[in-house]
Amino acid sequence: MKLRKLNVVLLALLLAAMAMVPIVSAEEPGPILTENAVISDDIGVIEANATGPISAAKDIDMTRDEFAEDNAAYFAFLKKELNLDQSAVDKIIDREYSKAKGSKSVTKSAMASEYSFDPSDASYNLPGSDIYLWPYTNTLPTKDAASGSINQVFIGNTRSQMDSYMQNNAYNLFHNGIGLSEWGNRNSFLVMEWVSSPADDQLEYGSYFGNRYHMVLFEGGFSLSLLKNWCYGSTHYEYWSDEDTNHYLYGNGFDQGREFVDDSISGSISRQSLDMQSDMSGYADGNGYKYIMA
């Protein structure tokens, strides 16, 4: 009898949660249009202004030492591969921590020296779904600055499944890569949360100390409106500089990375262009792709 009552309670909670969001087809959902939404048939881009999630996640204050610990695998990799002493590593840690905090006194190696946008104001709602996300990444769980532009959403795959696809089934096979931990901000059951792409659990195509396409993936969760798991990410094209032990983005580096991944994913997989409002002058035009992986 107690087990039966528990099942009834769990069913009631699930139905209540599903009632909070619009239910659309579990296959390929159509967009839910608002008065601010625009569909452009000639280029297949859907634009929509997000109204915002129910609950916003607060930034997480991470100290310099906590930042160093979060990226311990990355800094150990640089120390070993470049034969650096600890003082040189400390200077790199200070540089990267300042950039992640949004310090304007530090030249941003991967971005323009001054932001032409305010990443803290940005939000994105995937049309036709209950999926909300911050369309940028940062190397700290704060929106004070942005290290990357989100340009991919994968419906039907978890992060580990998408990681496996890119390493085993893509036309251009990626392999395990390393970089600074990246942080994304996205919803799980309409509550915004920070989620990490760990330093030693990322993907690359190419060479770290050369040219590479660098892909970071974030766990999305389960969408009640789509009835599917999802994940998302950011890919960019960059090169290594021995002069200051740093990576630099190529011009339109995020757009190049997005297109390289698109060319790597089977043409039989359904995709749709999106205006993700994640533009970064000279590096990202703000567009991305949504893929129906399963």
Image (spheres, rainbow, N blue to C red):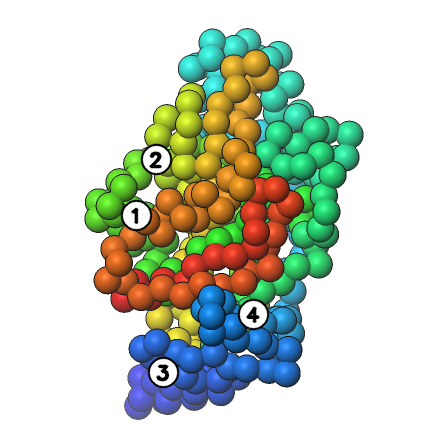
Q: Which residue is mark 3?
A: 25
Check whether the beta carbons of the residues at disc 2 and disc 1 lie within 8 A of each other: yes
Mark 4 and mark 1: span between their CA atoms? 25 Å
- Whether residue 258 is visible to the viewer of this picture, yes or no, is yes
Q: Residues within 10 Å of mark 1 (few under 14, many from 20)?
A: some
Question: Picture coordinates of residue 240 (x, y %)?
Answer: 49, 23
Measured from the top left, where is residue 187 in percent x and y?
53, 65
Secondary structure of residue under mark 3? loop
Tag nearer the camera, 2 or 1? 1
Which tag, 2 or 1, sits closer to the chain's start? 2
Residue 96, compared with residue 129, is above or below; it is above
Q: What residue would you read off at disc 4?
A: 47
The answer to whether the residue labelled 4 contacts the one labelled 1, judged by CB atoms less than 8 Å apart, is no
Residue at x 72% of width, y 52% of height: 118
SS assignment at label 4:
strand
Q: Quadrant of the N terminus?
A: bottom left
Quadrant of residue 55 in the image? bottom right
For the point 52% across and 52% down, which residue is it?
150
Q: Nearer the viewer, mark 3 or mark 2?
A: 2
Q: Residues within 10 Å of mark 4 (few under 14, many from 20)?
A: many
Badge 4 or badge 1: first in the primary sequence: 4
Q: Nearer the viewer, residue 288 or 104?
A: 288
Which comes sooner in the sequence, label 4 or label 3? 3
Q: Secondary structure at mark 1?
A: helix
CA distance for labels 3 and 1 = 27 Å
Q: Is residue 165 left or right of residue 105?
A: left
Mark 4–mark 3 Cα distance, whole angstroms, equals 20 Å
Q: Position of residue 37 (x, y in %)?
A: 59, 77
